[in-house]
Amino acid sequence: MSFLGKNYLIANKAGVKLFDKVKDLPIVDPHNHANVAEIADNNNYDNPWHLFASTDHYVWEVLRKRAVPEKYITGNATPEEKWMKMAEVFPDIAGNPVYEWIHLDLRRYLGIDDILGPDTGKQIWDKASKVLAREDKKPQALLKEIGVEVMCSTDDPLDMLEDHKRIKEMTDEFTIRPTWRPDKAMNIFSKNWADYIDALETRFDTLINSVGELMQVLRISHDYFHECGCRASDHGVARPYSGIASEKDANDAFKTARSGVLLTAKQTDSFMSYLLGEMAELNAEKDWAFQLHCGPVRDVRKFLFDTIGPDAGGDISDHNIDIVTPLIPFLNRFDNRLKVVLYCLEPTHTSTLATISRAFGAKVNLGSAWWLCDTPIGMKRQLEYICSVDLFANFAGMVSDSRKLLSYGSRFEMFRRILCDVVGNMVERGQIPEKIAENLVTKMCYNNPKELFGI
Amino acid sequence: MSFLGKNYLIANKAGVKLFDKVKDLPIVDPHNHANVAEIADNNNYDNPWHLFASTDHYVWEVLRKRAVPEKYITGNATPEEKWMKMAEVFPDIAGNPVYEWIHLDLRRYLGIDDILGPDTGKQIWDKASKVLAREDKKPQALLKEIGVEVMCSTDDPLDMLEDHKRIKEMTDEFTIRPTWRPDKAMNIFSKNWADYIDALETRFDTLINSVGELMQVLRISHDYFHECGCRASDHGVARPYSGIASEKDANDAFKTARSGVLLTAKQTDSFMSYLLGEMAELNAEKDWAFQLHCGPVRDVRKFLFDTIGPDAGGDISDHNIDIVTPLIPFLNRFDNRLKVVLYCLEPTHTSTLATISRAFGAKVNLGSAWWLCDTPIGMKRQLEYICSVDLFANFAGMVSDSRKLLSYGSRFEMFRRILCDVVGNMVERGQIPEKIAENLVTKMCYNNPKELFGI
Amino acid sequence: MSFLGKNYLIANKAGVKLFDKVKDLPIVDPHNHANVAEIADNNNYDNPWHLFASTDHYVWEVLRKRAVPEKYITGNATPEEKWMKMAEVFPDIAGNPVYEWIHLDLRRYLGIDDILGPDTGKQIWDKASKVLAREDKKPQALLKEIGVEVMCSTDDPLDMLEDHKRIKEMTDEFTIRPTWRPDKAMNIFSKNWADYIDALETRFDTLINSVGELMQVLRISHDYFHECGCRASDHGVARPYSGIASEKDANDAFKTARSGVLLTAKQTDSFMSYLLGEMAELNAEKDWAFQLHCGPVRDVRKFLFDTIGPDAGGDISDHNIDIVTPLIPFLNRFDNRLKVVLYCLEPTHTSTLATISRAFGAKVNLGSAWWLCDTPIGMKRQLEYICSVDLFANFAGMVSDSRKLLSYGSRFEMFRRILCDVVGNMVERGQIPEKIAENLVTKMCYNNPKELFGI
């Protein structure tokens, strides 16, 4: 079969037919890290490196694995030098989804079918540069070409969402909604937390002297986000929190931290647990979806963190964390009144999370395979398994989780193909009638996430 | 391929041939939760809901996922109203094995080929009601139709096993043996434990003032079960116990609990560990199989437990439990003198359990994929893996673990098909000669469980 | 398809083509437990049991599972009696890789195509005995026939490596390099540790009164091994160590243990962590590869350990260990300056290890699926997954890890077929261009391990 060809990732006839039904459905992407300002500015991309790799730590990590010096990744080499270094090692990337994504992006949206390697790097650079200079390859045109109907960026409670407003005024071809992501307010252990509370004081023009007052400004922000079209929050934590902690304990922790004293693990936990619980209450009131991204151990590679900082790579997953103890009380507190989406980072957590979703009824949903699992094999194994314990019909749908605009196309194509392969295989094994399968994949790709996220 | 058709679940030719060898073998089901009284009474089922869903918490859980109100699941709606609600959401269940089981039951034993959905719910209800009113669809006739040769129910040590005796006198077309399940005696942490000890005192007409006296009545019960044809015990625990604890510590815990004082975790552990060890000694004496069901975290959804009670759903698995520390001393204590069957609930425990089975020789056996894993993908992944570390020939065989009579058919059909698919695939890949594979699957489906359980 | 036939283990056409490219590449086996003296002596094997089973605890474990008495495994029955007992139960072994390995060995190197069973046991014994008596089936001739170019045995720092030298003088048809394996020096918790330190004193003719002096003799040994062609160390540990401990704490532990006093867990940890760190420094200086085999829980079956001793079976894997906490500081300490190979024993650790390898750049590599995972399904699942997070191009390559000479053939054949099946499947799904895949598998089978290990 040809590389990225018609039946890419689909190994059965029923799957091919299913994909035909869903491939042109509009993209609904309830969680990504879109550069909203870039989309609002709507300038042409400077060069192929900018679009393809400058914001993509998936690319960075695989280049590092091939011993590309940091100068050519996040350093001060020129974009073309970086591109050529990437081209040099690109054949060694084969088998990793980065290899597929980059080639998908080149083929689907730039019309370039060449295979990236040391011999083709320059010609692809030249071709891509030419294409990217065209009017119809500006960010907004690309989003339209990709077929984005609605997507949700990830935004800090401080954000005034001006870029979202600019886009709303410019176009109705697609919608970009914000997502409320209050991690910085919750991460009391971080050395940046104190500054962040200061920033909240400035933004909301008030003093924040207690956890109650902190929740007050967060509620104002939450309300503001709602007015601006936000319908979900997102929470990134190394492990779940129970949401069961007293305001008094949380406030003691707050005051201790504000006074500059280091917290005990117990105090940290009280504060974070309390805050997560109170923020979930805000969501429950407005029927927002509550997205929980739990599991990543961030910034473990000291060399990277010290030289480049966070979100640069050096993140891992850990099979050995306790999900059940904190997550069960949280879900019991909000049972039947909060829409929850649980994302899974680590394949060994899939089964536990699936049984938890199963146990907690209609409002608890599994999200798509995340980050280190958001690959053909990761998605395939997840989808095959979770339907057997939970329901396909309750799956929260694909999200790109990406910082890169073209990902809204290539990642959704990959997901839809894998989904159709998995469901098609079940059709061919006599597990699902064909007609039922058609409705199922259509809903999973389009209707269900729209309904669940209210977007 | 057609839904539930000839090659349902089997994707290779060798597997199809293998299935032809095993599909008509009698059913041997060494572990289920049969309603023995119902079988002894042998009355027609009142209605389709009664037979298909009234006792099946797998069905309940998926209906809850589709937001069916509890009134239509375990509540006071009429059976037909419940059936129609189920029909309404049934297309959304596709992909989950409940979808396959219900349709298998309708097709194989009621002769109804319709696909259940809102449009067909009523007609299936009517057809099924008519079929179930027939003489040849009473419980005993159904068991014969299914091909059950021998099955083992799950029974409390208090049980007089009268229903088993009634059936024995009524028919020799199939055998229903009891299984000794002393969890209530062991669960000293439970608020019902004290009442249970009282009940033992009444049943055995004696005072129970020490753990030694408790073991004496349990031994009487064990002997009685043996006379009644029992050849196995079954133990459900959230985690394994070492079986290494002194009688003195266990007795202290017993006395403390009897005096109404709450036990420490250490005391609870001493008692449970001691009791499990002593009960295993009883099995070793009589060469009974010792079935260990470890892993489930029960009743985590407070809403369900508070409103409906136990065994209603709301159970999960947890990847993050320690199996090795307690299980190794237990297996060493009974090495070479106790037949052990280890059931696996959680896919992340499969590999550890398989290496433990491998390490402890001929008498330690892996049981079939259990509960949340007892699905096409769960069984497939388990079987593919465990043969590579342990041996197919030592596999303890399929058990239905079901509360629903038709499951003795549909669950065994599903298992046999998956087994033939897995082994057939190995034949096609040149890993097993065809003749050897035929013998292997025949033994796994029939001879091995009969021999292992002595039934 | 025929048993062990042309397309054994390969289920797709692209894979068959790929295997054609790699099947005749020389064998590079950077880690095994070769009996170097046997190869240097180069005598004919006494009998088939000697070659096929006498050193292979994989075989022993499956015979035990079929209730073969220990007399016929490691006991004093004659080799022919043992062989016949093995033949008797061999059909029951089908599905386990031992079944494939033994038959591969018979077919590929002895020219015997019979299927081993009770009816064929004697005729295979006779045929095999005849073949093994031939000049061209002596160890060195067999290694040549297998196609071994270079292999690395596993050797104690005490070893004078005389056998390696003898072989070097006898032949240049293949190279056997030593590997430095200092576990006995590090395992301060072992009851044999004190004797081992005494042996080091004797071998190096010096007193060892401190951890510093211990490191001095280990450095001398390390240097000596380097002169003798060693380019890697190997470390077997139940769990990783951080390599972060003070010399003072390590020395206190050393002195306490030398005085015969039992260490606390903390002292043990300090010593082992310190030593592992210092030994890794030696590797970093000489650019040796540092192989970490972590995870096995050894000798858990008391009956085996008490009657036969270590390395006799009774070893398990444990899903429930913490890899991240100790391994991350270790890798940070040696970041960018130590070639590390991480072997995975337990499938539930695969994902964590893969993300760790991904995070730490070019010098950290995943090794082949190990021991209880070194099976068709274990290798397949590992390879499918790790490329999605890490890179195929960074995979450290296959190692046989075997005590049995024929394994250098059969285990590599198995690996290469599985690799080609996995990569071929990705080609057929359009994930990798065919030409790129050819280069990839060639490098993974030959060039990459040679380069990584510098051999």
Image: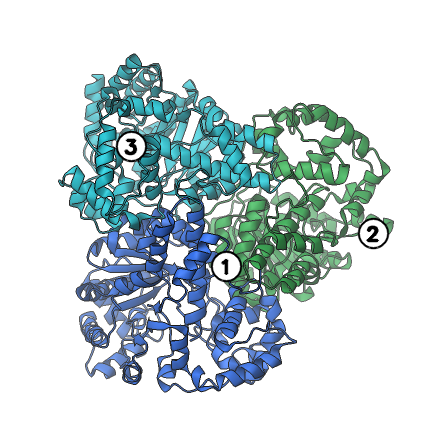
Chain colours: A green, B blue, C cyan
Q: Judge left or right: residue A412 versus residue B426.
A: right
Three-letter amino acid code of the residue under disc 2: Glu
Q: Amino acid at mark 3?
A: Arg
> Marks 1 and 2, Cα distance to the nearest angstrom?
44 Å
Q: Badge 3 sits on which subunit?
A: C
Would you say the residues marked 1 and 2 are in contact, meaning their CB atoms lie under 8 Å apart?
Answer: no
Residue type at mark 1: give it: Leu
Q: Position of residue B406 (x, y in %)?
A: 44, 74
Against A199, residue A358 (above or below) is below
Q: Which residue is mark 2?
A: A173
Relative to residue B240, is residue A135 depicted above or below? above
Residue situated in front as seen by the camera: A405 or B247: A405
Camera-near label (2 vs 3) is 3
Which residue occupies the foreground of this view, A443 or B237?
A443
Callouts 2 and 3 on one subunit = no
For disc 3, the marked residue is: C403
Residue B218 appears at what percent x and percent y? 22, 73
Q: Secondary structure at mark 3?
A: loop
User: Residue A137 is drawn in which quadrant?
Assistant: top right
Q: Which residue is mark 1?
A: B9
For the residues beneath circles 1 and 2, the answer to whether they share a chain is no
